[in-house]
Amino acid sequence: MGVGPSPTVVGGAPFGADPSRNVRATITQASVERAFTILLAMAAVGLGAADTPAVLGQLPYLHPVWGPLVAVALAASFVFVAVAAFLPRLAQPAQIACALLFLVALVSWPSTVQEPIPADQVPWPWLFITVGSAAAAMGFAAWRATVYTALAPAVYVVIRLLPVGGHVGLTRALLDGVYTAILSGAVLVIAVVLRRAATAVDAAQATAVRRYSAAIREHATEVERVQVDAIVHDSVLTTLLSAARAETVDAKALAARMARNAIDHLAAAASDTPGAAGPVSLVELRSRICSAVSALAAPVRLVERRVGDVRLPAVVADALASAALQAAVNSVQHAGGAEVDRWVLVEQQGPGVRIEVGDDGAGFDFAGIPAERLGVRRSIIERVVAVDGTAEVDSAPGRGTTVRLSWTPSTEEAA
């Protein structure tokens, strides 16, 4: 069950499938950044743990204060990168800190070494040069990361030519430098290409959503125009023509009846409610919701509660049923697989109704939902608010999600 308060909101649309619910981008800027953060965290922790013995073995040859301090600082930056994998807001600061600390460790190596390291060993910063370059590729802008990717191998080549770096000769130093440059450059190219592709996808999706919203508004306007035209043509104009030609008592009486019918038609169109649909009982509403969620890819259990004899306006029942179905669809798509416990509850609440759709799955940060994502705001929130109901979304990452919908008749409706 979700915890952590979310804004209480509601929304409106007719009951049925929402085309936007199936529009899911396969690659987005957020997903790319998330993947980069996780991969960098795995590399930092993995290489850090594997190469710790090599670093400790070289500390006796280094400055007794600066050598351990640099090693501990870089290790702390690796831990920071690992923590940032679970806290996306810290990802970029962690990547920048890791890249800068590695560069400090590399550049300061000549002044850190007090005794030449054994000939069969390499300066320990070389073990992590790929991690530092990858952190720069992810944390910096492309041009800064490019400078970093060129600078780090060049500094390492110079160090390897010095006695404090092993004095291995130009050929060996260049081979090590070129190898490092190629590996770091590949990481940089992949990061830049994927980021640009994700940015293009995000822009295309935002454009598609804007066009879809505009098309929906235009469609609604066209539908209303057609309805009004039909009323004006079939009722109003016909009534006016009949009244103009009415000369006998019977003709005048017929014109009066036609005028009353035209007024009724205009009033029904203005009310924005289904003209022929009658009230819906709570039992019928529960049955409609259960029938809809039973067709989903994951099981959703019904929590038995008292439903009473409350009857809802058809437009209210449609809005609540559609919002509940969208909440269940979101759960199936985002909360996890069939192992997640999902439930739906429909019960009478005074003269109104309360519906709860929940799960104990992945959860999400409601405040972090992008503006272009319409599933929650349009299909649940605005759908319920349009019929004067309320919707509350309780969710937090890792703690599940609960959507509570409620509707209470106004004083006039209750009377």
Image: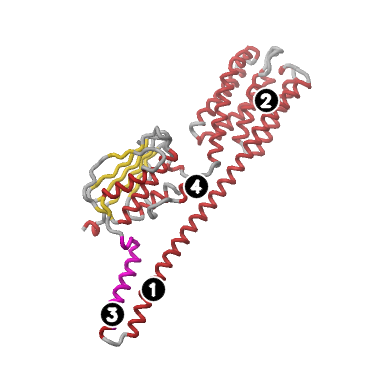
**Residue 177 in the image, given as x and y percentages of width and height:** 72, 25
Number of labelled discs? 4
Instruction: From the image, tell me which residue sits under label 2.
Output: 107
Neighbourhood count class around disc 3 (C-alpha, 10 Å): few under 14, some 14–19, many 20 upward: some
Q: What residue type is labelled 3?
A: Leu
- Dot in front, 4 or 2: 4
**Residue 88 in the image, given as x and y percentages of width and height:** 50, 35
Nearer-N-terminus badge (2/1): 2
Instruction: From the image, tell me which residue sits under label 3.
Output: 254
Instruction: From the image, tell me which residue sits under label 1.
Output: 232
Nearer-N-terminus badge (1/3): 1
Neighbourhood count class around disc 1 (C-alpha, 10 Å): few under 14, some 14–19, many 20 upward: some
Q: Does the magenta stretch include residue 183?
A: no
> Could you say which is closer to the camera, residue 226 or residue 6?
226
At numbered mark 4, what does the secondary structure look like: helix, strand or loop? loop
**Residue 364 in the image, given as x and y percentages of width and height:** 43, 38
- Residue 16 in view, yes or no: yes
Q: Is residue 270 magenta?
A: yes
**Residue 402 in the image, given as x and y percentages of width and height:** 36, 40
Q: Which amino acid does label 2 sit on?
A: Val
Labelled pair 3, 4 in contact (Cβ < 8 Å): no
Neighbourhood count class around disc 2 (C-alpha, 10 Å): few under 14, some 14–19, many 20 upward: some
Q: In this image, 69 relative to 12: left or right?
A: right
User: Colour mode?
Assistant: secondary structure
Q: Which amino acid does label 4 sit on?
A: Val
Residue at mark 4 to residue at mark 2: CA–CA distance: 49 Å
Quick one: quadrant of the N terminus? Answer: top left
Residue stretch in magenta = 251-276
Location of residue 278 (image quadrant):
bottom left
Nearer-N-terminus badge (2/3): 2
